[in-house]
Structure formats: structure tokens, C-alpha cells
Image (cartoon, coloured by chain):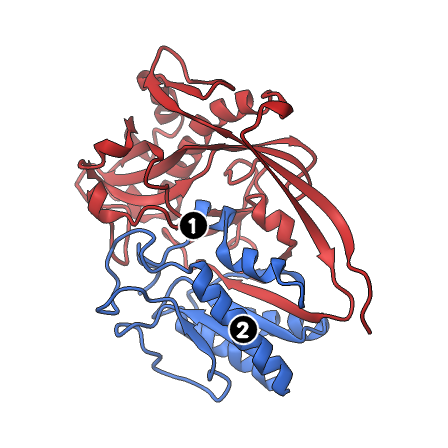
């Protein structure tokens, strides 16, 4: 039996391209594609996580500036914000042209990784232009966390680094939410669909859940966010079903 | 053993995952959803959660499953068990895994005849280069094509 495909719900992702990122007196992003970063702003996030974090610094890395040392890359994060609806439907705004990398080390020089680590020359340690990495011409905001001794090897410390980074990103999300819908540079529509009569396929994603830096969060309030997320470890590593639109709206946050 | 930088799926990867793009846009397939399953440390737990994933697939009357893992070594126990549990339930399954030369399976089972190796490095090793070996759209297309063949043969 074969029939008409049925659309269940719609997700619209509107992208706004950032042309330039520069230092400024506040963390700002505007519809005209200019981003400013306040170098000192990250200290307030360190203070909130002072049990785990000794220091945080942020760097703007332009495409031609990748010949520089980086600590191990814990994650690459898009800056996206929910404008209307919940994760998986409604409207999401996201920035293109700039991505956040979260990097980490502890005060003893121990990199925040276990099974191979990616510290070294940034130009050599990342394959640019892949699904999970910035493109050749993208700018990078490097959010570099120095953990207190040993804290980069335990789950609470790694989670604290992600949380601090998320709060920094949230400053931009709050502004991105208010961008005028018609001024986006790209617009993508996605539907969760049922295709009656076609082969029913399930994707199973086996994700990290062993503890320490191996963890995966789901269900954060913001796309690709941390705040409000649930750890797969805390859910007993049991299988959890998400819709295609929830998935592509950033319902997962890779903590490992 | 765990997840290395070259296979690790970053948050950005999950936001624009090639596997989801390929499967969801294929009009011959009715994608029911994405089942996220963790990788516990404890052996008994590994078998438990993977088996529950297979029970879900059976209960949903899945005609086929694509299972992907971005880690290897310790997590191969989970991966091989879940594939076996799906196979025993007569659900065609294709795996996506980093194998290369470094991560050959220690234990296999009869249902592991269709595994796409996401390795892209000539030496087949973990290179510590972020993004190098992670799943791309070619891997995803191979997996979808293999699954279609396997479902047709059934």
C-alpha cells in the first residue's frame, strides 16, 4: 500500500551570516553581520564555576590566523536560538560564518581528553569544511577553559566548562532571537513526514555514556545548548526517541 | 578506548548530520525517528540498553535499521550486541563504524555483514584531527544503499 506522504510538523531555520567579528566593549551581534566580543566578559562565567574552573579566555580566530596553538578541542558549537515553538518545530535562528570551539586543559597541563587529544596547531588539528567543523572561510570563537587540577578528567568539571561556554553563547542567542525574520541570509524548511507504504527505517545513534568526559545531553532549552539538558547517563543510557526535526534543531549536545 | 577527535561527532555535526540528511530526504524511505542510546561502562548495562533499542525497533515494526557509533573499542561491545539483537529479530541492519586498521572488531556475529567503515585516513588510524574520520554524506549514502538491498532480499 502506498499513499500520499503526510507532513506532521514544520521547522524553519533562518541563518544570518556574520561577516566580521571584532573586539568590543560588549558581546553583541547585529543583523548587518557584525559581531563584537568583550574579552573580559567571560570572567563572570569563571566565577560561577569556581569549584572547577581556574581561568577562561576567549579568542577571535580569523581564517588566516589558524597557525596558532590550541588546547584540545572538546566541542564545536553553532550559535542558534529558538524564536518560536519548541526544539523540533517553529522557528530557529542560527548564525553562519562563525562557530564556537570549546577547548580545555587543567592547571597542570593535562588536556581535557582521554582517548587521543587534539591540542597543537589549529590549522593541523582540524579538518575544516566537514559537517562537524567550521568551513575554510569561517571565523572561530575559541572559548578556552583552564580547569582546576584534575577537574578536566571528571564529569562535573567537563560539564561546568560546557555550562560556562553556553552562558557566553546565550548572550548572543538573546540578540539573535530578535533579528527580523525577513533579513535572514538563508531560509530552510524541514518537515517531519510520514511516507505510507515506504520502507520504515529507524536510525540508531550510539552515543557516549561511560562517564568522565564521555556524556551526551538531550533536551536543552536552546538549540545545541546546555541549560535544561538531561544527561544520557542520568537517564540510565536507555534508548530515547527523537524526531528528525528535533534532531536537526540541535536537541543533542556532545559533551565528550 | 572511547571516542577520538577524528571520529567524534561534535554538537555542530549533530546539528547538520549527513546521515539524517541522506535518510530523511530519500523518498523511498519512511524515517520513523532517531533512537539515541548511550554506552554504559558496565558490561551488563551495555547488553541491557542495546537490547532495549532492538526491542524498540521491533515494536515500531521497523523494516530496517541504520546504527552508527562514533567511538570504538570499549563501545564495540554495545555495537555488536545491538546489531545481534536486531538480527535475531529479523530486522535488516547496516552499521556505520570507525574500523580502519586500528579498530577491527574483536568479536563479530552473522548479522555484521554490512558495516560501512567511516575511516578516511590512509593509515586507518585515529589521527587526533577533529572531523577527519567522522561520518560524511558518502558514508551515509553507502549505508542507505546497503540497507535498501538488504531489505529487498529479506
Task: Return the x and y of residue A150 as percentages of the image width and height.
Answer: 25, 44
User: Which residue is pictured at 52% across the width and 82% down the height?
Assistant: B84
User: Which residue is pictured at 45% across the width and 21% down the height?
Assistant: A33
The answer to whether tags 1 and 2 share a subunit is no
Residue A34 visible here? yes
User: Which residue is pictured at 38% across the width and 66% down the height?
Assistant: B118
Q: What kind of element bears circle 2? A: helix
Q: Label 2, on which residue?
A: B145
Q: Label 1, on which residue?
A: A131
Chain ID for red: A
Colour used to depict chain B in the structure image: blue
Q: Which mark is residue A229?
A: none
Q: What kind of element bears circle 1? A: loop
Task: Return the x and y of residue A17 as percentages of the image width and height.
Answer: 47, 29
Picture quadrant of residue A148: top left
Label 1 neighbour load within 10 Å: few <14, some 14-19, many 20+: many
Nearest to viewer (mark 1 / mark 2): 2
Task: Return the x and y of residue B104 as percentages of the image width and height.
Answer: 32, 78
Task: Return the x and y of residue A23 as percentages of the image width and height.
Answer: 32, 16
Task: Identify the chain of the residue marked 1, using the numbered disc in the image.
Answer: A
Q: How many marks?
A: 2
In screen coordinates, is A225 left or right of B62? left
Q: Are marks 1 and 2 in contact (CB under 8 Å)?
A: no
Picture quadrant of residue A107: top left
Amino acid at each position: 500500500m502506498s499513499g500520499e506522504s503526510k507532513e506532521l510538523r514544520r521547522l524553519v531555520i533562518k541563518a544570518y551570516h556574520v561577516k566580521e567579528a571584532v573586539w568590543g566593549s560588549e558581546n553583541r551581534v547585529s543583523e548587518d553581520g557584525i559581531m563584537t566580543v568583550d574579552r573580559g566578559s567571560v570572567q563572570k562565567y569563571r566565577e560561577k564555576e569556581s569549584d572547577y574552573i581556574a581561568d577562561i579566555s576567549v579568542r577571535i580566530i580569523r581564517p588566516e590566523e589558524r597557525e596558532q596553538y590550541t588546547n584540545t578541542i572538546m566541542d564545536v558549537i553553532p550559535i542558534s536560538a529558538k524564536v518560536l515553538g519548541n526544539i523540533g518545530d517553529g522557528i530557529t535562528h542560527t548564525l553562519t560564518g562563525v562557530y564556537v570551539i570549546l577547548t580545555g586543559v587543567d592547571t597542570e597541563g593535562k588536556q581535557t581528553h582521554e582517548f587521543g587529544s587534539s591540542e597543537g596547531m589549529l590549522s593541523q588539528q582540524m579538518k575544516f569544511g566537514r559537517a562537524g567543523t567550521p568551513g575554510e572561510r569561517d571565523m572561530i570563537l575559541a572559548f578556552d577553559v583552564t580547569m582546576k587540577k584534575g577537574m578536566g578528567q571528571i564529569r562535573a568539571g567537563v560539564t561546568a566548562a560546557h555550562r560556562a561556554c553556553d552562558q557566553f553563547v546565550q548572550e548572543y542567542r538573546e540578540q539573535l532571537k530578535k533579528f527580523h525574520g525577513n533579513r535572514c541570509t538563508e531560509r530552510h524548511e524541514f518537515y517531519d513526514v510520514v511516507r505510507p507504504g515506504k520502507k520504515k527505517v529507524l536510525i540508531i545513534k550510539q552515543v557516549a555514556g561511560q562517564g568522565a568526559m564521555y556524556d551526551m545531553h538531550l533536551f536543552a532549552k536552546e538549540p545545541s545548548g546546555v541549560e535544561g539538558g538531561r544527561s544520557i547517563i542520568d537517564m540510565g543510557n536507555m534508548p530515547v526517541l527523537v524526531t528528525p526535526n528535533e534532531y536537526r534543531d540541535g536537541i543533542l549536545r556532545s559533551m565528550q | 578506548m572511547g571516542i577520538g577527535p577524528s571520529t567524534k561527532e561534535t554538537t555542530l555535526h549533530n546539528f547538520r548530520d549527513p546521515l539524517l540528511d541522506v535518510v530523511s530526504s530519500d523518498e523511498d524511505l519512511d524515517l520513523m525517528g532517531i533512537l539515541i542510546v548511550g554506552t554504559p561502562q558496565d558490561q551488563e548495562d551495555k547488553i541491557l540498553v542495546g537490547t532495549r533499542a532492538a526491542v524498540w525497533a521491533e515494536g515500531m515494526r521497523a523494516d530496517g535499521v541504520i546504527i552508527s557509533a562514533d567511538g570504538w573499542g570499549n563501545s564495540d561491545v554495545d555495537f555488536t550486541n545491538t546489531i545481534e539483537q536486531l538480527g535475531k529479530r529479523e530486522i535488516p541492519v547496516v552499521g556505520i563504524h570507525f574500523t580502519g586498521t586500528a579498530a577491527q572488531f574483536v568479536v563479530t556475529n552473522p548479522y555484521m555483514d554490512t558495516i560501512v567503515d567511516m575511516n578516511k585516513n590512509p593509515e586507518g588510524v585515529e589521527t587526533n584531527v577533529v572531523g577527519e574520520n567522522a561520518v560524511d554524506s558518502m558514508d551515509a549514502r553507502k549505508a542507505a544503499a546497503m540497507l535498501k538491498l538488504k531489505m529487498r532480499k529479506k
